[in-house]
């Protein structure tokens, strides 16, 4: 306002502008007299605006120009508050979004709750300790009562501000001038305790339409009317908030999780009204304890996580995993006493029966010590990996863990409890199977089994896939650890499989584990060492490893036709020994500190006592891909009926499920003819054309070449001759009794009597002398191993089911 003539004590008139004329005031109305006063070096005229209507006003006095520029406007302040009505007091959603808007640029608001909440509680609702000025936190933490700044809460901050003069005094907000006098997203200040209503209100200083979260965690259940009142105007607004108990719940999908020590345990926690929880694995009786944070990250309503019982408690970061969710562990998600926990674990706190103690690593250290598990580093709870016994597992919505007066662990708000029962690992058997030729990592054994392409055999045709099935538990956790070291595969290997180098790392790199596996020929050739399976150098397509954690087993798949799968060159009729062994030390048990036998690092399987080695072995032979047709005469020629429906049958060393066909091509004076029917091979090695072949265009006496083709390559070619009918008795006598006639003519020639047809040997009949299909002595690879294949395959299927 332009005024150079006013003096202290002068009386001015406060007038309301009725109308303007250009830049001047045309008419006005007198309201009241105002006396000019001094305020330091300034002259001020003070009057109340409470009773003024919204409009334009000016002061009339000597030397004061009555212009539009010297007028001022009085308007009514509006205040709009948006605040969710429902919150919880002991879990999410304890926070709610607060949004304040006004037609005024800068304003301060008093906040009250009708006396139902005191100033200290209001301060805690509106201020997150993480947003408090670090100078305040440092000052509080300097007190010996607070050795860890993380232990400081809103109550501590409130008391410190009151006791150290950082509060609004004399009702003047401009007294709060220190940089730490306002806090949080709402710039909250507290009143000096001598001010009227100081114990029931806080003030939001110089607000500019603030917005953010306020938190009702810890507030008593009730309905609260939260009022917002302008400090210097009549603007008010209020919202009612209902704070209720959190209805969170959780449960395990099983009461007992049974698994071999050293293997993988899968746990599912079903959650209600929350997306996270805290889990204690173990207790003082185990004795082992870990504290986990779990979170439903995919919105499924549950959390599924896995525990590698070989690595849990050792500090290894692959001890726990959750494919679609989140799991963090005190013992595996921490870099040590100088490191940091993930954010989710920083809220975990530990206390005794009477008072809060600490959080973080120091708190966890105190916790396991108070439970009598260890006096030092929590990573030193275990002398050896988790042993066979029962481990409680409990879930809670609260991050508070305490020790009772009887030195037992207690979870605040425990929701559910289950048991992880680890039993001693087993080493049951080892067997060999065969599958059609292909890359070792192309199909897992389950897919091969479902496709009918997996048969138990001890004789494996070179080029087919060898599958070694070890029924064993207590090795999957160590194999995963080896894969982390060697290839970084880790948890993905449970679904995708492991490269042979991972198994090699377990055997030769982690020798203290006491796990050994080898495939070695029984003898070498000349001065050469025996041929062995080359785990160290084979590519994934040559040798691949599939874990079977459900049934407790391990599959090693080998492309036998790949030279890089072998250290040396295998030849037909090479006999091999396959062995899986758990080795122990004669005198000492496994020690984590020694990575093997205590004090030596020598092999010492972690779950067996000293001097208790165990092993399973089997024998297998690599043979040539070979075929032997039925219905041959003394010269080896295959006899075929010149009929409409003829089955071509025989025996083969080629794996069932292989892509096999028989190309039949007429030769000589026979009418031009060619067909390539497909072939099916059963588990015993018997084969037959998939559909009957029509040879009616040919005549008795015609000849043909029969090519047995596997994956488009010819394995063998034999000569065939067409006859009116195949006589089983004649066939057997012609071959000296060593052939099996498996042809079943659909249409007998008129020269074949009914008795001959009745006595014809059927495709699935066997020689009466030993119950197995007979074979030509000159054809390698046929023997009792094939004959028993179908029975063993049935046994395999029964075990898997």
Image: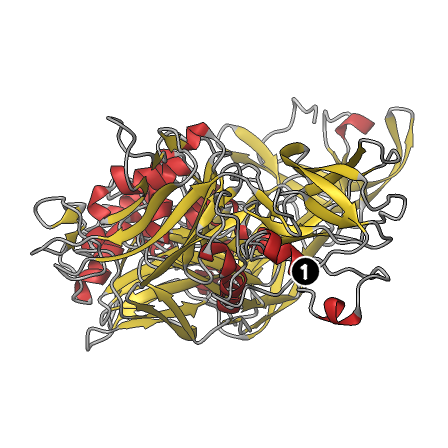
Q: Is residue 409 above or below residue 594?
A: below
Closer to the camera, 63 or 606? 606
Q: Residues within 10 Å of mark 1 (few under 14, many from 20)?
A: many
Mark 1 element type: helix
The quadrant of the image that shows the C terminus is bottom right
Above or below: residue 186 compared with residue 705? below
In percent of width and height, residue 789 lies at 51, 59
Residue 574, image quadrant: top left
Q: How many marks?
A: 1
Q: Could you say where residue 648 lies in the image, as x and y percent from the top left?
A: 72, 50
Q: Is 446 in front, or is 418?
A: 446
| Quarter of the figure that contains the N terminus | top right
Q: Residue at x 70, y 57 (%)?
A: 743
Residue 525 lies, in percent from the top left, at 30, 30
Is 758 on the left-hand or right-hand side of 123?
right
Q: Residue at x 48, y 47 (%)?
A: 777
Q: Nearer the viewer, residue 753 or 664?
A: 753
Q: Which residue is mark 1?
A: 728
Work out whether 793 lies above or below 417: above
Q: Quadrant of residue 313?
A: bottom left
Please say whether residue 127 is visible from this viewpoint: no
Residue at 19%, 77% in the rendered image: 406
Residue 367 in view here: yes
Q: Is residue 380 left or right of residue 398?
A: left
């Amino acid at each position: 306002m332009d005024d150079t003539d006013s003096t202290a004590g002068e009386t001015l008139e406060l007038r309301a502008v009725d109308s303007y004329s250009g830049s001047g005031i045309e008419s006005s109305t007198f309201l009241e007299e105002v006396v000019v006063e001094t305020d330091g070096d300034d002259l001020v005229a003070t009057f109340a605006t409470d009773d003024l209507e919204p409009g334009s006003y000016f002061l009339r006095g000597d030397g004061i120009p009555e212009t539009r520029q010297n007028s001022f406007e009085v308007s009514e302040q509006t205040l709009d508050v948006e605040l969710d009505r429902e919150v919880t007091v002991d879990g999410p959603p304890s926070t709610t979004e607060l949004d304040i808007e006004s037609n005024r640029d800068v304003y301060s608001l008093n906040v009250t709750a009708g006396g139902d909440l005191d100033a200290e509680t209001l301060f805690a609702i509106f201020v997150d300790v993480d947003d408090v000025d670090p100078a305040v936190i440092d000052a509080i933490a300097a007190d010996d009562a607070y050795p860890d700044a993380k232990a400081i809460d809103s109550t501590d901050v409130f008391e410190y501000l009151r006791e150290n003069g950082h509060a609004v005094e004399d009702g003047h907000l401009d007294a709060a001038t220190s940089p730490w006098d306002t806090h949080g997203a709402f710039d909250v200040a507290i009143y000096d305790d001598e001010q009227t209503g100081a114990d029931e209100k806080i003030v939001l200083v110089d607000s500019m339409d603030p917005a953010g979260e306020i938190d009702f965690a810890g507030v008593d259940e009730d309905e609260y009317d939260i009022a917002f009142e302008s400090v210097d105007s009549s603007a008010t607004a209020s919202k009612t908030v209902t704070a209720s108990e959190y209805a969170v719940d959780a449960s395990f999908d099983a009461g007992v999780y049974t698994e071999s020590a050293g293997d993988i345990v899968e746990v599912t926690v079903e959650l209600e009204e929350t997306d996270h929880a805290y889990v204690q694995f173990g207790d003082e009786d185990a004795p082992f304890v870990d504290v986990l944070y779990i979170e439903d990250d995919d919105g499924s309503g549950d959390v599924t996580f896995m525990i590698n019982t070989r690595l849990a408690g050792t500090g290894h970061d692959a001890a726990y995993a959750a494919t679609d969710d989140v799991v963090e562990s005190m013992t595996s998600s921490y870099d040590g006493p100088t490191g940091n926990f993930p954010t989710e674990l920083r809220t975990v706190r530990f206390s005794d029966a009477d008072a809060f103690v600490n959080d973080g690593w120091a708190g966890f250290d105190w916790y396991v010590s108070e439970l009598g598990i260890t006096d030092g580093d929590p990573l030193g709870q275990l002398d050896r990996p988790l042993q066979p016994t029962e481990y409680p597992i409990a879930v809670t919505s609260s991050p508070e863990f305490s020790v009772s007066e009887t030195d037992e662990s207690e979870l605040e708000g425990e929701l559910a409890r289950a048991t992880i029962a680890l039993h001693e690992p087993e080493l049951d058997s080892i067997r060999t199977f065969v599958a059609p030729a292909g890359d070792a990592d192309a199909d897992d054994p389950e897919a091969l089994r479902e496709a009918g392409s997996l048969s138990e055999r001890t004789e494996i045709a070179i080029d087919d896939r060898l599958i070694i099935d070890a029924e064993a538990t207590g090795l999957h956790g160590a194999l995963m650890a080896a894969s982390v070291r060697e290839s970084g595969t880790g948890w993905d290997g449970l679904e995708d499989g492991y490269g042979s180098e991972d198994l090699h790392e377990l055997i030769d790199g982690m020798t203290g584990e006491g796990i050994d596996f080898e495939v070695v020929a029984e003898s070498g050739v000349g001065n050469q060492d025996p041929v062995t399976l080359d785990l160290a150098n084979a590519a994934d397509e040559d040798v691949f490893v599939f874990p079977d954690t459900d049934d407790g087993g391990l599959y090693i798949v080998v492309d036998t036709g790949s030279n890089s799968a072998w250290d040396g060159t295998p030849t037909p009729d090479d006999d091999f020994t396959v062995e899986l062994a758990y080795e122990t030390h004669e005198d000492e048990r496994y020690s984590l500190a020694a990575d093997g036998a205590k004090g030596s690092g020598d092999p010492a399987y972690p779950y067996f006592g000293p001097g208790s080695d165990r092993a399973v072995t089997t024998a297998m032979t690599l043979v040539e891909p070979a075929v032997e047709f039925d219905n041959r005469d003394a010269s080896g020629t295959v006899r075929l009926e010149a009929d409409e429906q003829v089955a071509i049958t025989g025996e083969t060393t080629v794996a069932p499920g292989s892509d096999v066909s028989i190309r039949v091509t007429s030769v000589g004076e026979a009418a031009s003819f060619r067909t390539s029917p497909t072939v099916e091979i059963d588990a015993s090695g018997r084969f037959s054309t998939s559909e009957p072949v029509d040879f009616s265009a040919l005549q008795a006496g015609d000849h043909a070449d029969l090519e047995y083709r596997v994956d488009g390559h010819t394995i063998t070619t034999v000569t065939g001759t067409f006859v009116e009918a195949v006589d089983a008795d004649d066939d057997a006598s012609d071959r000296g009794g060593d052939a099996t006639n498996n042809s079943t003519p659909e249409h007998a020639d008129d020269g074949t009597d009914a008795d001959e047809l009745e006595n014809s040997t059927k495709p699935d009949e066997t020689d009466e002398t030993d119950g197995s299909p007979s074979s030509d002595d000159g054809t390698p690879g046929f023997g009792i191993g094939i004959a028993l294949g179908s029975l063993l395959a049935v046994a395999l299927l029964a075990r898997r089911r």
